Amino acid sequence: MLEYLRDLGAQARQRLGQVRKLEELGEWKREYLGKKGAVSELLRGLGGLPAEDRPLVGRAANALRAELEAELERREQVLQQEFVQAALRTERVDVTLPGRRPAVGRVHISHRVLRRIYDIFAEMGFQVFDSPEVETDRRNFRSLNIPPHHPARDMWSTFYTTREGVLLRTHTSPGQAWAMQAYCPEPIRVILPGKCYRYEQVTARSEFMFYQVEGLAVGEGITMADLKGVIIAFTRRMFGSERQVRFRCSYFPFTEPSVEVDMDCILCQGQGCRVCKYTGWVEILGAGMVHPVVLRNGGYDPQHFGGFAFGMGPERITMLKYGINDIRWFFSGDLRFLRSL
Ligand code: FA5
């Protein structure tokens, strides 16, 4: 029996030496030291031995169990060490590798240009005034001297909602009514930035959604000279002091007289190119002296108050400033475009 124990010990040690992975140790433990393992079986079988042999064999079996347990622990430590060493070798981090830059966002180009516009007008005493994108027919058209069925409505292709008389504003001019309501009877000097919507064909120069910045000044003694001075000061601050500006007669129902303002084409220096349609001039905004009907609708007496208003498209201004040839890039969500500016 003692000889069997010796062989069992030798066999167990040999097998233990062959175990190469930590997870295989469990199997070895079950086979030799588990409840149904070889050593336990042996101890259970002691009862079948002659009484005088039992203490000796029992002691030897218990000693073998203790030895094997100690060897299991040692083997476990060795394998653990090997595992750690292998992991250190294969999973080594090369701290000299260049890091991965986190993607840093930035302010959209439309908003950067808007902020520049705010700054320039702030220097001239204009405050930013917010007004809603969803408007009533009354404010978008009627308060601006465009009654129902007036042919001037054709100048603005409109997104009407299913609610009678509610629409997406086609320009920022209805903001004039909000500003007059808020300031009347005080003088006004505000700019009204925001999105506008037009139900029209999207092309390289026209979007169905775009920004506008409206300007409105109301007070006593305001003349066309003030309007011209403000627009010229703005274009020179925005585009450089060498820029030329021209005022063309135009028509808007809410201003009288009305003008459209062109700037010499920055891309071709007025020589003529595709962007300026070979005229050397690019339209940047519509403007005029606030119509007496609009002043009266806003609560101001046109006998004592006058004013000027203008409306510009910041995307078109950005296109000129940065030489962008298609307005559709702005809201395409294309990161190549956004990162290039
Ligand atoms: C107007 O919207 C008038 N409300 C401007 C105005 C305000 C005149 C106050 C007088 C007094 P207009 O439709 O021309 O005018 O648009 C003004 C500017 O908005 C244009 O010069 C252009 O820069 C921009 N714009 C107009 N339509 C689009 C479009 N579809 N896509 C991009 N920009 C546009």
Image (spheres, helix red, strand yellow):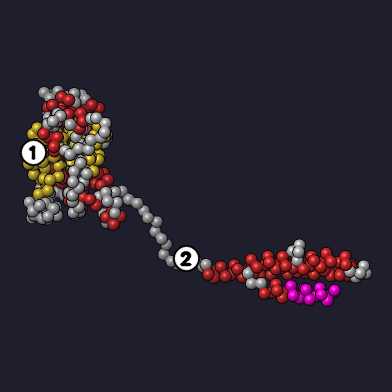
Mark pair 2, 1: CA separation:
67 Å
- Residue 11 within the segment the image draws in magenta: yes
Q: Nearer the viewer, residue 18 or 126?
A: 18
Q: For the C terminus, which image quadrant?
A: bottom left
Q: Residues within 10 Å of mark 1 (few under 14, many from 20)?
A: some
- In the rendered image, which residue does mark 2 sit on? 95
Q: For the N terminus, which image quadrant?
A: bottom right
In percent of the image, x 14 and y 48: which residue is there?
241
Q: Amino acid at mark 1?
A: Ser
Compared across the picture, whether 72 is left or right of 45 comes to left
Q: Nearer the viewer, residue 83 or 98?
A: 83
Q: Residues within 10 Å of mark 2 (few under 14, many from 20)?
A: few
Q: Quadrant of residue 176?
A: top left
Question: Residue 131 has which mark?
Answer: none
Q: Amino acid at mark 2?
A: Val
Above or below for 216 versus 107: above
